[in-house]
Image (cartoon, grey):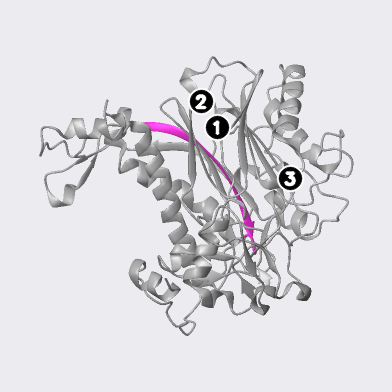
Amino acid sequence: MSAGWFRRRFLPGGPLPEPQPAGPRSSPVPYHRPRFLRGSGSSPGATDASRRPDSRPVRSPARGRTLPWNAGYAEIINAEKSEFNEDQAACGKLCIRRCEFGIEEDQEWLTVCPEEFLTGHYWALFDGHGGPAAAVLAANTLHSCLRRQLEAVVEGMLASQPPMHLSGRCVCSSDPQFVEEKGIRAEDLVIGALESAFQECDDVIGRELEASGQVGGCTALVAVSLQGKLYVANAGDSRAILVRRDEIRVLSSEFTPETERQRIQQLAFIYPELLAGEFTRLEFPRRLKGDDVGQKVLFRDHHMNGWSYKQVEKSDLKYPLIHGQGRQARLLGTLAVSRGLGDHQLRVLDTNIQLKPFLLSTPQVTVLDVDQLALQEEDVVVMATDGLWDVLSNEQVAQLVRSFLTGNREDPHRFSELAKMLIHSTQGEDGAAGEGQVSYDDVSVFVIPLHKQGQGSCGH
């Protein structure tokens, strides 16, 4: 089966279009830090552009600014890896209108009285690569996309069982039975709304970056509280965990070159021209050398979970598309889907960039039924970008959280102080990360308390 046949058979988009002449470009996406950091005591431009390697201040919201649920937040910029902090964050209150179909064409949607609004809360972290533009756009856009997607399904969310027809019309008397057999619940509509919001936001980012002549992408880690449940959606290598007195629960699955290997290899199989003759899609246990030519060595391709042997040819000596293992694995000549440029169009990102997609694939969503937990005051969700997890394990973070909260019960700002302490622990302070374990990456942390939920609000 050839790549050409596979493309013609399964990808109606056909071959990649020829590059078009550049049209007029809009202004570059302006760089800024999260709005809730305003008044925190330092200027984003001065802090980011003129910092010294030995002076990386940890920033958190000003004491008078309360985030949703009294959540804590802190961040630190990288050690001159890039000019700007490429992480972004957003949080706020979601107000979802309950709508009904109108009779007249100009009344397609009618907003019902305010007491029937559905409200929730939202926290999000974005870790950019190739510049901060995509992360800034995501932080500015994703919450609006999510609100629109939730408003489109809110009638079904509020029903005891999501109806087959949102309008309430019954075409088949067995419709409720069919829905029940599929096991469709209200939370599935929220999951679908999150997935659709990621897709919509990705489209916006693709268009904006193309129009402004900018490049890059970002990860996205989002927590949404609705109707007594916490939905955690992740695309990328950030992570969220639930820390309780006697439990650590991982709430997100990370996208790494290792987990995305087969999908990336398959893209290279379908579009070999994207490898530009410089890379091989095949994976080997190590980078091959000239002496390996003619020998049979271990390898695997896009259709393989296991391994086999192949006789090494000269073409196998090219740079591997996938190199390394685990969190240290890298994609060389990374292939990324930019849905903003079309469903089946691809871009080759700069080489030697660690996998940081924005929607390389559908986000993975975990649902935490908060109402079913016997919550205690120290129960929190910790969300952080990979700069934290590169040097601290889940167990180390949980130990720091428990120790800090137990000794600071009376401090009303303890959750922001905890977020700052976690970041300090990645800088070789307190010995938490172990000798020599220092994060030189951007690090951003939310600490979300689950006890006495719903206090406070903030702008995006």
Give the residue type that dot 2 points to. Gly
Q: Give the secondary structure at mark 2.
A: loop
Q: Residue most toward the bottom? A: 21
Q: Give the secondary structure at mark 1.
A: helix
**Near-viewer residue (28 or 418):** 418
Dominant secondary structure of the residues highlighted in magenta in the image: strand
Picture quadrant where residue 95 is located? top left
Q: Which residue is mark 3?
A: 390
Q: Give the secondary structure at mark 3.
A: loop
Give the residue type that dot 3 points to. Asp
Q: How far from the left and from the top, in percent, is residue 144?
A: 43, 48
Residue range of the region highlighted in magenta in the rendering: 118-132
Q: Is residue 353 visible?
A: yes
Q: Which residue is mark 2?
A: 454
Q: How far from the left and from the top, in percent, is residue 351?
A: 67, 69
User: Which of the two labelled residues, at mark 3 and mark 2, occupies the earlier sequence position?
Assistant: 3
| Label 2, residues with CA under 10 Å away: few <14, some 14-19, many ≥20 | some
Is 119 covered by the magenta stretch? yes
Q: Which residue is mark 1?
A: 68
